[in-house]
Amino acid sequence: MSTFAVILPAAGQSRRFNDRAYKKPFAPLGGRAVWLHSAERFMHRADVKQVIVCVAAEDRELFDLKFGANIAIMGVQVVEGGAERVDSIQRALECVKDGIDFVAIHDAARPCLADPWIDDVFAAAARDGAAILAAPVQATIKRADAKKHVQATVDRAGLWEAQTPQVFRRQLLIEAYAKCGPEPVTDDAQLVERLGKPVKIVPCSSLNIKITTRDDLKLAEQVLKVLPKPKLEGFQHPFSTDDLWR
């Protein structure tokens, strides 16, 4: 059986979330912090041998204080992130245990996962070396200029909205990050693409949403009600997180 480490980046600034009390991974969602929903989807899996969450250095002390019990019970490893997302992932990669075959990177602020989606993307990565969840673009897409005047309607055929988890053979991801360069990237698959390596798309539901604004929390709460619950064998939450991060 292939083995997987899961990295949950949660070190961003959450500027678009526009909440002075919370950064989006730590906001309460259905009684627990957003990042806990994301992490729990991997905790019961026999093939997941390590879960690493990246938090900003400025948040580390409060994170440990508020979530110390969860961290201990779940066995999650905490790593301080860097100035940019790529810096955070690189630091987490350095902490992946020896013998791990694949690394999955999943947004800490993407809490609405279902087990079959993880099964599918893990299997595709094990088969092809690199795989991501993605949803086909359904809306009509317009390209506009700086003044927001429509310049063209973009053909959506073949367009996909990338999601996470994004899963890669460990050495492939290490090589991709070693050669990442200064060009900006918005997801990990971009770095693998730059190596000229194929990345398999695994179709997924648009319900696999990422929390970006506070309104997304309302949608996520409804989505969680219709998704099957994770199989948390023997795991219990030590406390509610309704008031965390205040």
Image: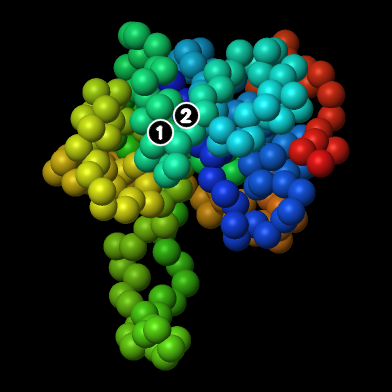
Front in this rendered view, residue 152 or 239? 239
Q: Residue at x 69, y 40 (%)?
A: 26
Q: Is residue 150 left or right of residue 224?
A: left
Residue type highlighted by circle 2: Ile
Color theme of the render: rainbow
Mark 2: which secondary structure? strand
Against 6, is 114 above or below?
A: below
Q: Is residue 98 above or below residue 212?
A: above
Quadrant holding the C terminus:
top right
The residues tagged by marks 1 and 2 sit, at their Cα atoms, a distance apart of 8 Å
Q: Residue at x 74, y 24 (%)?
A: 65
Whether residue 208 is situated above or below residue 170 in the rendered picture: below
List x then y, in percent, for residue 171: 24, 23
The quarter of the picture where residue 144 lies is: bottom left
> Identity of the amino acid at label 1?
Ile
Q: Residue 83 at x, y = what percent?
A: 45, 42
